[in-house]
Amino acid sequence: MVLHAEPTKAQDETSTPGRKRRIYPWIVLALCFGLLLSDYMSRQVLSSVFPILKAEWDLSDSHLASLSSVVALMVGLLTFPLSILADRWGRVKSLILMAVLWSIATLLCAIAQSYEQMLGARFLVGVGEAAYGSVGIAVVLSVFAPRVHAALAGAFMAGGSFGSVIGVAIGGFIAVQFSWRWSFAIMAIFGLILVALFRALVTEKRLAKYAVEGPPAAIGDAESVSSYRAPLSSLFTNPAVMWTYVGSGLQMFTAAVLLSWMPSFFNRYYGLGPDKAGAVASVFVLLVGSGMVVCGFITDRVSRNNPATKWTSATAYCLIALTCLGVGFSLGNGPIQLILIGIGAFFSAGSCGPAAAMVANLTHTSIRASAMGTLTVANNLLGLALGPFVIGVLADHLGLLGALRIAPLFYIPAAAAMFLGRRAFPAGLRKLQELRPADAAAGIEGK
């Protein structure tokens, strides 16, 4: 072992060996991504057992939809306040507490004896998962350069789709081979194992050491640098950011419908059993996640010289999904229908990465978790909670297929919001610059 003098505060950021500095951010990404998989596995495993619960407890589609939407509803209601608390109390501690709570709540789902008990357990799952997405992505972005934020945000948020794939596919298999209760129990055990690894390897001190950008206090000694914190009101006074919240939430409406209702679609209209329906639906859910990753990379490439192009890309993804899904669900069963739905699924949530990058790049780093929390609120209230529930209610009156034909229409207002966000981008940059002088002044005073 080579001994060396402890680095000074000024040297701290650059003293970490280059190879170690390159590896640790990827460790953080891998662990945060793994917990996001657990998050959505616990959330979406329910979809794979919809047919079983419907028969066993004699539930309507509205009841099934409420079991799914209550999680997204709690995420939407609690994300913002819990994200603010995480910015102040500590992001790592917050993530650990969240993961433990949703894993235990998923165990409660496994022992539920009625619809009411399952609804209560799902409520707790939603409380535990409420701010994980916003705080987790804030942690990941803090150790990577802004030039890759759209790709990273898309890849990270795609963990929701990949987790859904695993949850639906494995959940359906376990439910048929053993019991639907074991489907929930396995997801809970996986979450508890991951949170133990996260607790062992990720700390606030290490994150501060490897931070790429952020307030000075995120890198150096908190007592000798700026303690400036941007006002929370700045999250709602930037016009470009506001339009991004709306557009991102609305484009998640149909994506959430695909995540929740595709197993039932294949069960009812293609005559597949719960296990096979879950397996086939998982392919389409995988397309949703893959599209989030690929669209994020594409957006980073095309917007390298013009950041405003992020909004153009997001608008294009919405319009492609609108066309393919709208036509696909209007056709009869067959390969052409599946191909069009598959293309639509690929682009259905393609705007997620660009939207997260827009919000991150136009809000102050001291309140980034809160900004991501606000985006998550919009995604859940306008998309993840609203989509499955509305389609469930419509399905009781129009049939599931009739309801699915309506879902893609929500891409129209989503595309309009993204277009307006692009037009407001110059004003958004000015709003962000207004915070920088105060930041700089606080840093001088701190020194």
Image (cartoon, grey):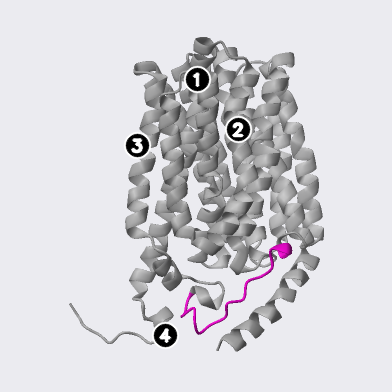
Pick the quarter of the image with the N terminus. Answer: bottom left
Q: CA distance from mark 4 to mark 3?
A: 42 Å
User: Is disc 4 surrounded by few (<14), some (14 to 19) or many (20+) residues within 10 Å?
Assistant: few
- Disc number for residue 189: 3
Mark 1 belongs to which amino acid? Answer: Ala
Mark earlier in primary sequence (1, 4): 4
Mark earlier in primary sequence (2, 1): 2
The answer to whether mark 2 and mark 3 are in CB contact below 8 A is no
Mark earlier in primary sequence (2, 3): 2
Q: Position of residue 64 (x, y in %)?
A: 59, 21
- Residue 319 is left or right of residue 107, and the answer is right
Q: CA distance from mark 3 to mark 1?
A: 25 Å
> Nearer the observer, disc 1 or disc 4?
4
**Tag 1's secondary structure?**
helix
**Residue at image x 71%, y 27%?**
390
**Tag 3's secondary structure?**
helix
Q: CA distance from mark 2 to mark 1?
A: 23 Å
> Nearer the observer, disc 3 or disc 1?
3
Mark earlier in primary sequence (3, 1): 3
Q: Quadrant of residue 93?
A: bottom left
**Residue at image x 68%, y 77%?**
436
- Disc number for residue 70: 2
Pick the quarter of the image with the C terminus. Answer: bottom right
Label 1 belongs to which residue? 277
Label 4 belongs to which residue? 9
Q: Is residue 77 visible?
A: yes
- Disc number for residue 73: none
Judge whether residue 366 is colored magenta.
no
User: Is disc 1 surrounded by few (<14), some (14 to 19) or many (20+) residues within 10 Å?
Assistant: many
